[in-house]
Image (cartoon, rainbow, N blue to C red):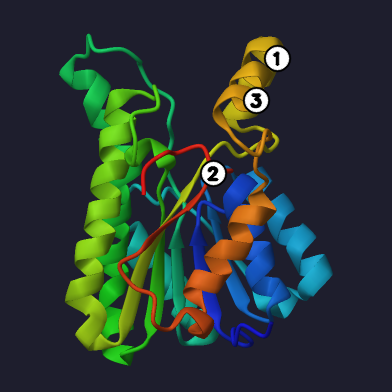
């Protein structure tokens, strides 16, 4: 299926590895131009070189920086416009689920996870929105989590932050629809990739981790970054032109809710 993304410009926040890198690669596979972002310079450069070798130097741009920092959205947008003069799709993939579990939580257990998973995304998007609103065209996708949809035993602050992110995306979609913009979120389940948290769990306790997957995920396996990326580019494309305010789950059937 032609998604109609050829020659468009996508900025994928948090794209030096894992899901973000797969999303960037999927956009390039559809003929888009892509801005990569990451804090780790060497990892980001490796990703840029790899993607440029496959898709052309002229279609890949890397911006090194911390998307949680104030002003990062403004700077990443400036670099994008200097290179290509436009932005069509923004994918906010930054975040982390690492944190203290259980109920005995201090204020310091909440703030970092809300900063990483909610405030950084809302701040970055707020800085980019004037450009998209002025163009009356574009799509924003937030990478959420099934932990924000159901109680699954993840750190409570992480789950709460992701739930707030889904709510923010839905409300933003209603506010921006008259401006010709679409906003959606995507909630992955257990996605395995090098350097990710599930690789760490498998290394520490493979038997218990695999048993949990078999018990909780009807499909009986981890998901891949490429499976999430395929959904991400679809939601950002004109093929999903009547989809806004949605949160799409991709979890192998793990969540039980509607």
Disc 3 packing (10 Å; few <14; some 14–19; many ≥20)? some
Marker disc for residue 237: none
Q: In this view, does 45 lie above or below 74?
A: above
Quadrant showing the N terminus: bottom right
Marker disc for residue 206: 1
Labelled pair 1, 3 in contact (Cβ < 8 Å): no
Distance CA(mark 1)–CA(mark 3): 12 Å
In the shown orientation, is residue 34 left or right of residue 66?
right
Helix, strand or loop status at disc 2: loop
Q: Determine the residue positioned at 28% across, 74% down.
A: 129
Q: Determine the residue positioned at 51% across, 51% down.
A: 14
Q: In this view, does 34 lie above or below 136?
A: above
Q: Determine the residue positioned at 20% across, 73% down.
A: 174
Q: Quadrant of residue 230?
A: bottom right
Q: Where is residue 215 in the image (x, y as percent from the top left)?
A: 59, 23
Q: Nearer the viewer, residue 258 or 4?
A: 258
In the shown orientation, is residue 106 left or right of residue 20?
left
Labelled pair 2, 1 in contact (Cβ < 8 Å): no
Distance CA(mark 2)–CA(mark 1): 20 Å
- For residue 17, say whether it is visible: no
Q: Nearer the viewer, residue 166 or 31?
A: 166
Disc 1 packing (10 Å; few <14; some 14–19; many ≥20)? some
Q: Which of marks 1 and 3 is in front?
A: 3
Q: Position of residue 66 (x, y in %)?
A: 42, 48
Distance CA(mark 2)–CA(mark 3): 13 Å
Q: Determine the residue positioned at 72% across, 73% down.
A: 29
Q: Position of residue 142 (x, y in %)?
A: 39, 57
Q: Quadrant of residue 216?
A: top right
- Identify residue for label 2: 251
- Identify residue for label 3: 214
Helix, strand or loop status at disc 1: helix
């Amino acid at each position: 299926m032609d998604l109609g993304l050829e020659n468009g410009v996508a900025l994928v926040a948090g794209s030096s590895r894992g899901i973000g890198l797969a999303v960037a690669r999927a956009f390039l596979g559809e003929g888009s131009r892509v801005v990569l972002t990451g804090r780790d310079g060497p990892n980001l450069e490796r990703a840029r070189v790899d993607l440029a070798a496959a898709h052309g130097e002229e279609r890949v741009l890397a911006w090194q920086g911390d998307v949680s920092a104030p002003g990062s959205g403004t700077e990443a947008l400036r670099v994008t416009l200097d290179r290509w003069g436009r932005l069509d799709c923004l994918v906010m993939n930054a975040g982390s689920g690492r944190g203290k579990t259980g109920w005995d939580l201090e204020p310091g257990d909440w703030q970092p996870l809300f900063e990483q998973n909610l405030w950084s995304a809302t701040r970055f998007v707020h800085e980019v929105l004037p450009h998209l609103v002025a163009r009356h065209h574009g799509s924003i996708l937030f990478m959420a989590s099934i932990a924000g949809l159901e109680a699954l035993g993840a750190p409570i602050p992480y789950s709460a932050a992701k739930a707030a992110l889904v709510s923010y995306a839905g409300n933003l979609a209603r506010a921006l629809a008259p401006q010709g913009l679409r906003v959606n979120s995507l909630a992955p389940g257990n996605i395995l990739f090098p350097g990710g948290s599930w690789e760490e769990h498998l290394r520490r306790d493979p038997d218990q981790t695999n048993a949990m997957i078999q018990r909780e995920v009807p499909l009986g396996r981890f998901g891949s970054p490429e499976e999430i990326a395929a959904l991400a580019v679809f939601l950002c494309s004109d093929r999903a032109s009547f989809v806004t305010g949605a949160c799409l789950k991709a979890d192998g059937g793990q969540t039980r809710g509607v």
